[in-house]
Image (spheres, coloured by chain):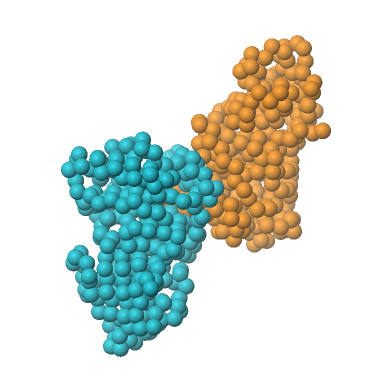
Chain colours: A cyan, B orange
Amino acid sequence: MHSIKVKSPATLSNLCCGFDILGMALNEPYDIIELIKKEESGILIKHKDSYQLPADPKVNISGVALQAMMDSLNYEQGFELVIDKKIKPGSGIGSSAASAAGVVVAANELLGKPFNKKQLISFAMEGEVLASGSRHADNLAPCIYGGLVLIRDTPSMDIIFLNIPPLFITIIHPQIEIKTSYAREILPKEISLKNAVTQWANVAGLVSGFMKNDYELIQRSLQDVIVEPVRSKLIPGFDDAKCKCLDAGALGGGISGSGPSLFMLSETEAIARLVENEMKSVYNQIGIDYKTYVTTVANNGVELIK
Amino acid sequence: MHSIKVKSPATLSNLCCGFDILGMALNEPYDIIELIKKEESGILIKHKDSYQLPADPKVNISGVALQAMMDSLNYEQGFELVIDKKIKPGSGIGSSAASAAGVVVAANELLGKPFNKKQLISFAMEGEVLASGSRHADNLAPCIYGGLVLIRDTPSMDIIFLNIPPLFITIIHPQIEIKTSYAREILPKEISLKNAVTQWANVAGLVSGFMKNDYELIQRSLQDVIVEPVRSKLIPGFDDAKCKCLDAGALGGGISGSGPSLFMLSETEAIARLVENEMKSVYNQIGIDYKTYVTTVANNGVELIK
C-alpha cells in the first residue's frame, strides 16, 4: 500500500463528573488525513483547510506525532501528509487529538500494523504535548478506540472501553477563544473532601448508568460540582444555555474539554434537535457567532476511507 | 403472622476508593433478630448475646429504628425484640446497621410489607444516627438490598444495585477500639484535585471492573489515595498486613468502614484462606487479639429464617 486516507473524529473529554478520565468519540465533525509514502526522508505537510496551521513538521501536531512513530522504527523514508481539518482548532472537541491520532493510525496501516492501540496513543501524545504542554489521553483514547473510554491511569495507559446505550450529542461551539493553559490555571488546586465524594459518587453513577443502559441514572449522575462551576464563568451564556437545554429534555451535559464548546447528551434525535435550537437562541440573543452539531457516538475511532 | 426471625448481615462500607459510596453485604457474620407482636404498646428488648447493649428502646439502635417505623404508621400495639448479636459492636463491619436494618425488615414483614426498601433504609437510618451521629446509608443499603450497592446520593436515597463476579472476602478484626467520631475527625477537610481525580478514576475502574467481571481491572482499581493513608495509621500492623495479603494473591482491600477491621477481596477461596493466614501471622506477631472471617457476598440482604 502506497497511500491511505482516514477520517479522524472529534471527541468529548472531561465528560461532566468524569473530568480527566472519560472521553467519547463523535461521528461529526472529523478531519480527513491522507498519508502518502515517499522515497525521500522527512515529512512534507500540505493543508487543504484554511486554518493556517504550520506546515513545518517540527511544530505541527500531526508532524510531531508521526515523527515519534518513525523514530521508534528508525524509519528512513518519508511521508507526504495532506490534512483537511474540519474540527476547528481551539474548539474544545479534540481538534489536536484528531490531528495526532489520525496520522499515527494511518501510518500504522501503511506500515503493516507494527503497533497496538496503546502504542499509537503514546506516539500521538507527543502531538498533544506540543498542543497543550500536558500528557493527557482523554481525547486521544476515544479518538483511537471509538465509543466511550475510561482512562483509569495515563502513565500505565490503562484504558477501558465502556458499553453505552444509543445517545445523541448536541454541541455548540461559540466562536470565542479560551486558552487551555488558562482553563487549567484557574482550576482549584485543593477541593473539599465533601465535593470530591459527591463527584466520585456521580462518576460511579454515570459509569454504571452507561453500562446498565439506564438513561435516568445517567441523567441523575451528569453533574460536575468541581470543574464546571469554575470554568463555566469563562463561557458567556453557559448557565442560561445549560438550563434551557435541560428544560428541553437533555439528559445533561457541560463543557467539552476545556471549552468553549458546550455539549448535551440526549436520548433521542428529536430532543437533541430541540436542544440545538435552545443553544442557538441563547447565542443569537448574546450576539456571539457559533457552530452547532447534532451527532451520535462513533463506535469506531479513526477509520479508513475506502 | 405473630412473630418472625431474621438474619441481618455484616457489611463492608468505604470500599477502598469508594469511600462513602460503595457497600457490600457479607454472608458471615450476621445477627439474629426475633420480633414478636404484643398487645401492649411499647418495645421490649431482650439480649441473647453478652455485649451488654442497652435494653431501653430509646437508646438502643434497633429500638430507635423500630420506633421510627411505628411512629410513621401511628402503630398502637407493641413488639418484643430478641437480639442475638454476632457482629461485635465497633468492629467496622456494620454492626449498628445490622441492628437497625434487621428489625425494620422484620417489622415490615410482620405488618404486611407497608414499606419499600428505601423507606426501610430511612427508618433504619434513625438507628445509625443514634450510633454515629451521622446520616449515612453505606452499610444500611447493602444490608437491606444485599450484594454490592452504590449510594449515589443519600438525601434522595439514590441507591443502585451493581452486579459483581464471585468474590471471597477475608476480614480480620483486631481487638482494638477506634471511635468512629475520631476516625471522621482526622479526615482531611480539603484534598488535592490531583488525588481526587486519581480516586474517581479508580472508582470508575472499580465499578466497571465489577460490572464486566474483570478481576484484573478490579485489582488495579482497588486503591484509595485519600482516606486509607490517614486512617491506616490508627491500625497497628495495617501496612504490613496489607502488603502480605497482596503478596498472597488478594485482589486488594483496605479498611472496612472506619476500622479497625481490615478486608481483602480474592478471586478464589484458596487465596482468601492464604490471605487469612497472612493476616493472622501479622497480628500474632504484634500480639493483638483478633477474629477472622472468610466469607462471600450475600446476594440477599436481611433474610427471613424459616
- Residue B156, given in percent of the width and then of the height, sits at 51, 31
Quarter of the image where the C terminus of chain A is located:
bottom left
Of B256 and A236, the residue lying toward us:
A236
Q: Residue furthest right?
A: B306
Q: Is residue B50 visible?
A: no
Q: Is residue A191 above or below residue B157?
A: below
| Residue for point 59% across, 61% down | B216
Q: Residue furthest bottom?
A: A39
Q: Is residue B121 left or right of residue A158?
A: right
| Residue for point 68% across, 53% down | B166
- Residue B262, given in percent of the width and then of the height, sits at 64, 47
| Residue for point 37% across, 58% down | A27
Q: Is residue B32 above or below residue A188?
A: above
Of A204 and A106, the residue lying toward us:
A106
- Residue B239, given in percent of the width and then of the height, sits at 60, 54
Q: Quadrant of residue B22?
A: top right
Number of marks in the rendered image = 0
Quarter of the image where the N terminus of chain A is located:
bottom left
Q: Is residue A280 left or right of residue B197?
A: left
- Residue A101, given in percent of the width and then of the height, sits at 36, 68
Q: Is residue A162 left or right of residue A140?
A: right
| Residue for point 42% across, 71% down | A120
Q: Is residue A165 left or right of residue A69?
A: right
Q: Is residue A82 visible?
A: yes
Of A201 and A189, the residue lying toward us:
A201
Of A56 and A103, the residue lying toward us:
A103
Q: Quadrant of residue B217?
A: bottom right
